[in-house]
Amino acid sequence: MTEEETVPAVRADRLYKVFGKEGPRAVDLLSDGRHRDEISELNVTAAVIDVTFDVEPGEIFVVMGLSGSGKSTLIRMLNGLLEPTSGVVEIDGTDITTLPSNQLRRLRSQHVSMVFQHFALFPHRTVLENAAYGLEVSKTPRAERREKAYHALGLVGLEGWENHVPEQLSGGMKQRVGLARALTAETDIILMDEAFSALDPLIRRDMQTQLLELQASLGKTVVFITHDLNEAMLLGDRICMLRDGRVAQIGTAEEILNAPADSYVANFVEDVDRSRVLTAASVMLPPSEGLDSSVAPVHPDTTLANLFHRASRSPAPLPVVDDSGRLVGELDGSALLAALAPNGGEAGGAGVSGTGTTVTAEPGRPVSKEGGRP
Ligand SMILES: Nc1ncnc2c1ncn2[C@@H]1O[C@H](COP(=O)(O)OP(=O)(O)OP(=O)(O)O)[C@@H](O)[C@H]1O
Ligand SMILES: [Mg+2]
């Protein structure tokens, strides 16, 4: 197995946040399995209930749920802005719930940056100064701050805009500054709370693509909050579905689509266009011996929606070839169709994972997992 002894970048262990005086008592009742509506006599708001997960280094972990499901409360506990009522948060192996505040501040500035929905830019500062802000707080020398901020602005496509002020920028560009600020801080973990939710759809799509590219090249750990299932499926290596403060399911987009944990999750994902979530990688079979190599290959990340035409017209299975030119699988029209029926993905997808090969379904990833994460 490829399982190594890595320390999770972010770890939540039986985490609770209950607002109100009777928080600790509420935790006792909730941990016995009571729904948050059943403890209304305590006059508390149970925002996060018994949440446990590990986020691996380099992973994009999406927390997804409806309004009020506890997403923001959760992320604020992950960076130590909010103290849990019960449970533990670890950042790169350090329990932050017991850290004195000066150490917490230091750990946060070295390990965790945050990108907000409404940009949180200083209106009278230039783009460059805004991007450098985190380093200013940590008292990095000016020249170094500027150099790092220049570099980060380049990474997000804002070179040439360094001396503008935020009001001269579009929403998408402002959010790029927010992202550049997080990159300038050079933390290994970036927390993003509905970071793209205020953007127009096309710009949002651009930002999603850019985040995937940056993540693939820089290998950051990203915890990304959204209430948009399509965004969750596109971005997430894994998705944590929250319902009324509790975890409904944690899994890859494919796992959630093909094996929803309960009827709530099933209803939630019912309307997802599977052909736009599932990729060649998730439905391909291991390459067979006699695969016709003259057939033009497809990339593992190609969505099924973009494969129909070719698959239905090709007399031979399509070779699936990754970025490094390696043959990783093959695909034919029937595997493709089988994957589209709810629970029908098992015909293709489960066949692959069931063989014990290392082919891993990673819908929406720009780089195949097999090719290795940077
Ligand atoms: N400081 C607070 N004091 C009391 N209740 C709070 C506080 N912060 C959040 N809550 C409550 O906790 C619950 C979860 O809120 P939270 O903001 O975490 O949800 P969310 O999933 O981020 O929602 P949204 O999608 O609307 O941002 C809500 O019922 C909210 O009213
Ligand atoms: Mg929120």
Image (tube, helix red, strand yellow):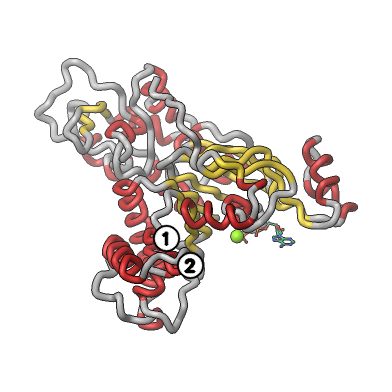
The residue at which mark 1 appears reads as: 182
Residue 72 visible in this rendered orientation of the protein: no
Residue at 29 percent across and 48 percent down: it is 217
Q: Position of residue 20 (x, y in %)?
A: 81, 57
**Residue 87 higher or lower than 132, as above or below:** above
Q: Quadrant of the C terminus?
A: top left
Q: Position of residue 57 (x, y in %)?
A: 43, 40
The residue at which mark 2 appears reads as: 137
Secondary structure of the residue carrying tag 1 is helix
Instruction: Characterize the local packing of mark 2: few (<14), some (14-19) or many (20 or more) Cα atoms within 10 angstroms.
Output: few
Q: Quadrant of the N terminus?
A: top left
Q: For the residues marked 2 and 1, what is the alpha-carbon distance in whole angstroms?
A: 13 Å
Q: Quadrant of residue 363?
A: top left
**Residue 151 higher or lower than 253, as above or below:** below
Mark 2: C-beta under 8 Å from nearest atom of ligand 2: no
Residue 350 lies left or right of residue 81; in this view the side is left
Q: Which amino acid, mark 1?
A: Ala
Residue 325 lies left or right of residue 186; in this view the side is left
Q: Which amino acid, mark 2?
A: Val
